[in-house]
Image: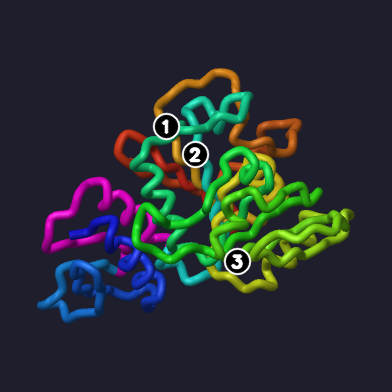
């Protein structure tokens, strides 16, 4: 049975397994191992279809259907993930965003974090949500945290500076401050985003998750850094609020981005993957 206790272990095992080959797995309560066809109770085909000899809930089946194809790609990937309403809002104008998406979607997000080597957020996300950016909803590995704070406006009151896990802060400020368990990397203000991308590439992470906010994701999409742009769409209407994306204005619809894409159900929500630059 796949549960929150072992799905992170399973995803990590798939992540580190040989790509583009059939996987016969023996799934136990707290361990996953390669197995023979006869003894396996979980079979991942070369085309990423899944067969199981035990019952698996529709919810965890959906998570695996979304994440297995990503893990089986034999390349580095940068995934930007946006949780939004059906009318494209990620928060109210006052910044409130708890909770647009369902609690089950948070479990999915933590699974996505667990397959990521690093997670990128902007300073506004830290200020508004004060997140830990961990995989605490499942038993999974925590990604390294990369925070973009151009003006170095954060301080040690936020949770990420008080849990002992490492942070990397990118800034264009020369302000002299110390942030707990953090390495501050200063970049020139000119071409800041392009220089930022170069520096992140030097860190040599294979899977990078960009979790927010709107400004950070939009900047990275505009600079063609994102491979998969993923929308987690909740069936609610908000009306006024903060847009999920603010991309460069175009003068004609023939200049619109029209990428390959797919759709997946996750409980009562929809996951849309747009494949950019991949």
Q: Are marks 1 and 2 in contact (CB under 8 Å)?
A: yes
SS assignment at label 1: strand
In primary-sequence order, the first of circles 3 and 1 is: 3
Indicate whether residue 65 is drawn in magenta: yes
What is the spatial separation of the Cα atoms under label 3 and label 1, in whole angstroms? 32 Å
Mark 1, Cα crowd under 10 Å, few <14 / some 14-19 / many 20+, is many
Q: Does residue 77 show up?
A: no
Asked where in the image residue 16 lies, by quadrant, the reply is bottom left
Q: Which residues are magenta?
A: 46-70
Q: Is residue 155 magenta?
A: no
Asked if the residues shown at circle 3 and circle 1 are in contact, with their CB atoms under 8 angstroms apart, the answer is no
Q: Which mark is residue 166?
A: 3
Is tag 1's residue or tag 2's residue first in the polypeptide sequence?
2
Question: In percent of the image, x 62 and y 25: which residue is there?
Answer: 94
What SS does tag 3 mark? loop
Tell me if residue 144 comes above or below residue 236 in the rendering: below
Mark yes or no: residue 164 visible: yes
Left or right position of 7 against 204: left
Q: Which residue in the structure is indicated by mark 2? A: 83
Place of residue 98 in the rendered image (x, y in percent of width and height, measured from the top left): 48, 33
Residue at 69% over, 73% down: 202
Question: Foreground mark, 2 or 3?
Answer: 3
Residue 43: x and y in percent read: 21, 68
Please name the residue that numbered disc 1 is placed on: 234
Q: Whole-Å distance between the Cαs marked 2 and 3?
A: 25 Å
Mark 2: few/some/many CA within 10 Å (<14, 14-19, 20+):
many
- Pick whichever, 90 or 66, lies toward us: 90
């Amino acid at each position: 049975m796949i549960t929150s206790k072992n799905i992170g272990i399973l995803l990590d095992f798939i992540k580190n397994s040989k790509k583009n080959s059939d996987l016969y797995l023996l799934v136990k309560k707290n361990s996953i191992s390669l197995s023979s066809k006869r003894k396996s109770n979980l079979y991942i085909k070369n085309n990423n279809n899944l067969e199981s000899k035990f019952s698996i809930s529709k919810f965890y089946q959906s998570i695996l259907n979304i994440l297995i194809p990503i893990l089986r790609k034999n390349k580095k990937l940068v995934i930007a993930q946006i949780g939004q309403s059906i009318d494209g809002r990620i928060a109210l104008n006052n910044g409130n965003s708890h909770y647009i998406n369902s609690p089950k979607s948070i479990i999915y997000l933590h699974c996505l974090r667990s397959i990521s080597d690093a997670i990128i957020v902007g300073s506004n996300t830290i200020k508004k949500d004060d997140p830990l950016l961990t995989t605490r909803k499942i038993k999974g590995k925590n990604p390294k945290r990369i925070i973009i704070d151009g003006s170095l406006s954060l301080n040690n009151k936020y949770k990420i500076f008080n849990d002992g896990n490492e942070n990397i802060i990118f800034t264009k400020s020369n302000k002299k401050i110390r942030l707990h368990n953090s390495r501050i990397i200063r970049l020139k203000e000119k071409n800041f985003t392009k220089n930022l991308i170069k520096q992140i590439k030097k860190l040599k992470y294979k899977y990078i998750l960009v979790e927010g906010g709107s400004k950070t994701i939009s900047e990275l999409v505009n600079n063609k850094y994102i491979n998969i742009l993923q929308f987690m769409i909740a069936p609610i209407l908000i009306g006024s609020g903060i847009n999920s994306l603010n991309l460069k204005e175009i003068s004609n619809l023939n200049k619109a981005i029209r990428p390959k894409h797919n759709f997946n159900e996750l409980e009562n929500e929809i996951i849309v993957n747009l494949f950019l630059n991949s």
